[in-house]
Amino acid sequence: MPTWKDVTTIGLALPKTEVSTWYGTPGMKVAGKGFLRLRTEAEGGLVVLCDPEKREMLLGSGDPAFYITPHYEGYPAILVNLKKVKNPVLRELIVESWRRKAPLKLLREFDEANR
């Protein structure tokens, strides 16, 4: 079961990433832009940015690790239950979320270094 520490370990392995706050909760930023955040304990879940088509696929899969609330409808994000998500899937989602906010120059450098 991944924890916030696992999330930050994955995130900090990506360039220009920092642990910060975003909307008043623990979060991560790339080049100063938020790309994921841990909702309050009462709300639960990790907010991860993702492609709307991928979000619909994940929600349609029936996997209990993924859900959405009315607040996030129409927004390119999905909520991830850390108690139920598998580490490889979480890693993929974190990288995708990072890519959605990273500056283009940084994306090119990252892709070049990871060929």
Image (cartoon, grey):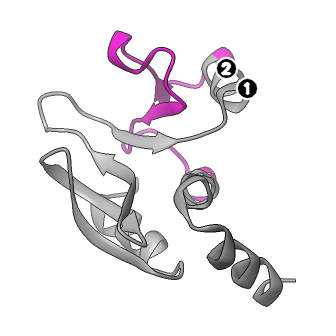
Q: Is residue 56 above or below residue 100?
A: above
Quadrant (top left, top right, bottom left, bottom right) of the C terminus? bottom right
Q: Residue at x 55, y 49 (%)?
A: 86
- Identified by mark 1, the residue type is Glu
Question: Real-space Cα distance between discs 1 and 2?
Answer: 5 Å
Q: Give the range drawn in magenta.
A: 60-89
- Neighbours of disc 2 within 10 Å: few (<14), some (14-19), many (20+): few
Mark 1 — residue? 53
Name the image quarter holding residue 81: top left
Please tell me whether mark 2 sits on a helix, a strand or a loop: helix
Queried whether the magenta region covers residue 70, the answer comes back as yes
Kind of residue at disc 2: Glu
Q: Answer with left or right where residue 27 lies relative to residue 64.
A: left
Q: Name the residue under label 2.
A: 56
Residue 71 falls in which quadrant of the image? top left
- Would you say residue 96 sits in the magenta stretch? no
Image point 62% across, 50% down: which residue? 89
Q: Position of residue 55 (x, y in %)?
A: 63, 28
Question: Image height check: is 80 above or below 28?
Answer: above
Extreme-right residue of the structure: 115
